[in-house]
Amino acid sequence: KESAEKEEKEVGKRRIRRTKRAVTAARLLKIQKQEEEWEEKKYEDGVKWKFLEHNGPYFPPDYQPLPDNVHFFYDGMEVKLSPAAEEVAVFFGRMLDHEYTFEEVFQANFLTDWRKEMVDEERLLITDLDKCDFREIHTMHKATVEAKKNSTVAEKLALKEANQKILEEYGYCLLDHHKERIGNFKIEPPGLFRGRGGHPKKGMLKKRIQPEDVTINCSSESRVPVPPAGHSWKQVRHDNTVTWLASWTENIQGVTKYIMLNANSKLKGEKDWEKYEMARKLKLCVDDIRNQYLQDLKSEDMVTRQRAVALYFIDKLALRAENEKEEGETADTVGCCSLRVEHVTLHKKLEGNKYVVELDFLGKDSIRYYNKVSVIKKVFKNLNMFLEDRNPGDELFGRLNTIMLNKHLSSLMTGLTARVFRTYNASITLQEQLKELTNKSDNEQEKLLCYNKANRAVAILCNHQRALPKTFEQSMANLQAKVRQKKQKRVISISQVVDKKAAVRRCKEKLLKLDVQAINREENKQIALGTSKVSYLDPRITVAWCKNMAVRIEKIYNKAQRDKFAWAINMTEDDFEF
DNA sequence: AACGAAACTTAGAATATGTCCA
DNA sequence: TGGACATATTCTAAGTTTCGTT
């Protein structure tokens, strides 16, 4: 009987082993298949699809005039505005509690563009924004928002269903026989331009887009989308070397806006995979490239030395390359190549460190970059020379631009550009940090805390910041109070509970969770983790870590992120190395 | 080679939705 | 059960790089 049992056990074990092996084999096959599919060039160069069909973009609803009980006043006098002028007045009125409406540039641009929409009579009257009273418009807007919040369950459901219908009709396309989700299928509604930082055009009127402004792109054998009744498209194109479905030119800066696929689409996924493969390629030759630019610091040629210092910054500090831009058209922001003398201060010694470079400038989105960093002597000497006898407004690397830099990089490695360094350094940092911080024996809470820490290190490297949440101090205080409460409860009330051990354990767990929450929140208050997670960190590092650490992927990636990174989730084994 | 335009990625804010606790 | 807070999604501005033209 005993031996029979033994045998049964053995058979069971073997069966488990066999199924395990089968599962592994199946998974490997799947990975191989996907890699093959992606690596083989399906189409000739530059061709992105063979068939593309969609219903065109969704247009925002027409303007609804104000009800008769909402008034606009000028200089204390009630003025009934013409529909076009009224629509623009509402754009401003809705924003009354936004800080932009107090800014001079925003106000001036708004007034200029608003007056263009007025009829002669209105234009004659309305010349001073300070005399305009939008408060009733603002109140109405607040009331509308509030009413929507307080609407009944049935009303909310009806709204949801209406949105669902729009999504079904306009949110998908057919690309090479696959139904794919479109990312931004809605035409941007009119409003006031919200440029960031000191943008000289903020407050200007962003005009309503008509079908006559929109170019459609689809395949010639597809059903061409039907424009809204009584309208026609600007143009219908059949260009399969691009990925966009529709485009139009925006009136503020004259740039083209596109309607493109969602991040979970095959087209975007492949592109993402290629991006990380390029970064992994850089990993293989980064030592050589580093040696090269360290050599170049000693070059006779000024441009070469400037290029070397710029590369040193891009590599060590993960700075963006940054093109120079037209003055007066955009906010005054810079990146590595467009740094000016005024952004750099040198300290031979600072706070016990040698050769410190202090960088202080506004980067993309007018986010401040501030860093004091020790550099090697050769870099310091070069910087010192670049700064000599120069004016604050002069460019630090006067003889260098992104084109030259990228040309040089692509000669070192095919496809290499400045941007790849950011991807590479971000991903390798995550991998190293995870290796250093996490232990298999930690519980899930602790592991997640480590992941966050690693993620945070990357976000800091890439300078991904966010505004301090408006209610931060209050919510932090609330959390602290909760922790205190829990601690007290542990002492007082547990002594009366029957199953003391379990109660203590439960309480401890809760306390730990709260503690972790508090630590995370405090350390994350001005740091945005999302950007690096979604755009810089090779998802395969995360997937492999999750497998190794037995952490559920749902704990790291939300639904949208899991969809976006489906390729990585499907093809990654626990031994993946970036 | 220089340029401006086009195409596509990256970015934080705004808004919507979900969750948790009193 | 509702409101406070957390998290997810949407939105569109602002970058980088490539492309096309002269």
Image: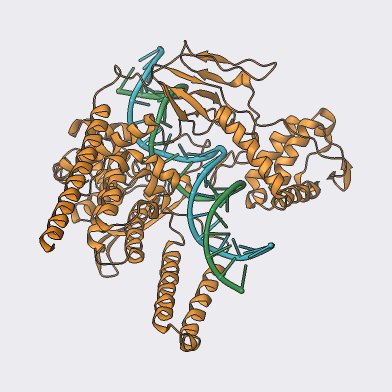
Chain colours: A orange, B green, C cyan
State which quadrant residue A248 falls in: top right
Compared to residue A495, the image places residue A461 above or below, namely above
State which quadrant residue A177 falls in: top left
State which quadrant residue A35 falls in: top left
- Residue ID at (43%, 79%): A503
> Could you tell me how many numbered marks the image carries?
0
**A564 with respect to A3 (left or right):** right
Q: Nearer the viewer, residue A150 or A499?
A: A499
Residue lying furthest right: A77
- Residue ID at (29%, 57%): A550
> Residue A223's x, y, as percent?
53, 14
Quarter holding the N terminus of chain A?
bottom left
**A102 with respect to A302 (left or right):** right
Compared to residue A510, the image places residue A568 above or below, namely above
Residue lying furthest front: A1
Look at the image and tell me whether residue A126 can be seen: yes
Look at the image and tell me whether residue A385 can be seen: no
> Residue A387's x, y, as percent?
31, 49
Q: Nearer the viewer, residue B19 or A464?
A: B19
- Residue ID at (67%, 48%): A101
Compared to residue A386, the image places residue A479 above or below, namely below
Residue lying furthest top: A221
Q: Nearer the viewer, residue A254 or A431?
A: A431
- Residue ID at (35%, 54%): A552
> Residue A408's x, y, as percent?
23, 33
